Amino acid sequence: MPPVTGTVLDAIGNTPLIQVDGIWVKLEFLNPSGSIKARVAAYMIGRAEREGLLRPGDTIVEASSGNTGNALSMVAAVRGYRMIVIMPAGLSSERAAISRAFGAEVRTVGDFHVTEALALARELGARPGHFAPQQFDSEWNVEENRTWLAPEILTQLAEVAPGTVPDAVVGGIGTGGTIIGVGQAFRAANPGCRIVGVEPDESCTIMCGEVGRHLIEGIADGFVPGILARHHQELSELIPVTSAEAVAEMRRLATGHGLFVGPSAGAHLLAARRLRDRNPELATIVTFFCDEGEKYLGDHFALSSGSEPPPARSPRPTQPEAEPKIATSARQAAADPRR
């Protein structure tokens, strides 16, 4: 029986690890708030409290495409803080509604990508009585994934088959905290472990400097996050997945496996299978199903007529931006199968 706990925050973590199509998948969408971001939200707020950066009555402010905003709103509700979530327009309406349900104030700035929201979050976070966790830049994000999420997975793999260590970890790049932090811990267990990032084919910002609209919310937020700028050399390669492919795979996971998850899960599983197909020697590949399908009902699952879901909304391309400084090295990493 699950233990009796004090608050919903005590239920974060210890999510199942299962195999889907021969790939090990951590079911992070089962966390409270419905996503993997419950971990980093609880971790960063706990650290801020211990270091005196947050005091009773303060306001937490964060730029988010949705999941971190939901998770921080949940933590703020439990811990008694005000919460301001700054989101761009053009994302799933459910994400904003969830943050509001937790009592957060949601402000909309910019369109689709979070660049403008980041600037406002920094400005507000610098005010007295405010704290901005800065998920895209904070090493606490990497630390949480290295010290909490990754050890859970390593323990679960060892329970299934003693001595098993990951040969590769595959994950989309939003903040970069998950793939870098988990990758660091996996490489400590297996120095040859591949760390593989996933980007939408329509917005390969890291691989080739392009920024565009896409349907894989939660990754590719329109810029190179500070975490990845510092740690990009740790990536082995990048795999692009189109929005249409990710959404189709998301739907297959629901109807074929009973896993009601978001588009990033589809992208992650496709990328992991492609990595295995190219590298059959990689026996143990780990990825994540990061958020729940309920956050995408209106975009991908609501009925229009009959019993079939409506077609997924099409991404609208934007003009490519200047190539980020790390794009060349990341593209080299993607092209070099030995890394």
Image (tube, rainbow, N blue to C red):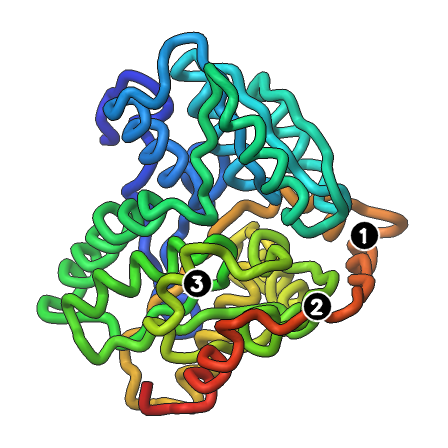
Image quadrant where one finds the N terminus: top left
Local packing at callout 3 (Cα closer than 10 Å; few below 14, some 14-19, many 20+) is some
Question: Residue lying furthest left in this view?
Answer: 162
**Left or right: residue 58 compared with residue 153:** right
Question: Residue lying furthest top in this view?
Answer: 57
Q: Is residue 243 visible from the viewing direction of this image?
A: no
Give the CA distance from mark 2 to mark 1.
41 Å
**Sequence-first disc among 2 and 3:** 3
Image quadrant where one finds the C terminus: bottom left
Q: Which residue is mark 1?
A: 307
Give the CA distance from mark 3 to mark 1.
45 Å
Secondary structure type for disc 2: loop
Q: Nearer the viewer, mark 3 or mark 1?
A: 3
Q: Is residue 259 visible from the viewing direction of this image?
A: yes
Q: Which residue is mark 2?
A: 321
User: Please, what is the three-letter code of the amino acid marked with disc 1?
Assistant: Ser
User: Please, what is the three-letter code of the amino acid marked with disc 2?
Assistant: Glu
Q: Which picture quadrant has residue 19?
A: bottom left
User: Please, what is the three-letter code of the amino acid marked with disc 3?
Assistant: Ala
Residue 326: give its label: none
Local packing at callout 2 (Cα closer than 10 Å; few below 14, some 14-19, many 20+) is few
**Sequence-first disc among 2 and 1:** 1
* Residue occupying the point 46% across, 40% down: 134
Q: Position of residue 274 (x, y in %)?
A: 48, 82
Q: Which picture quadrant has residue 11?
A: top left
Q: Position of residue 148 (x, y in %)?
A: 24, 46
* Residue occupying the point 30% across, 83% down: 282
Residue 229: give its label: 3
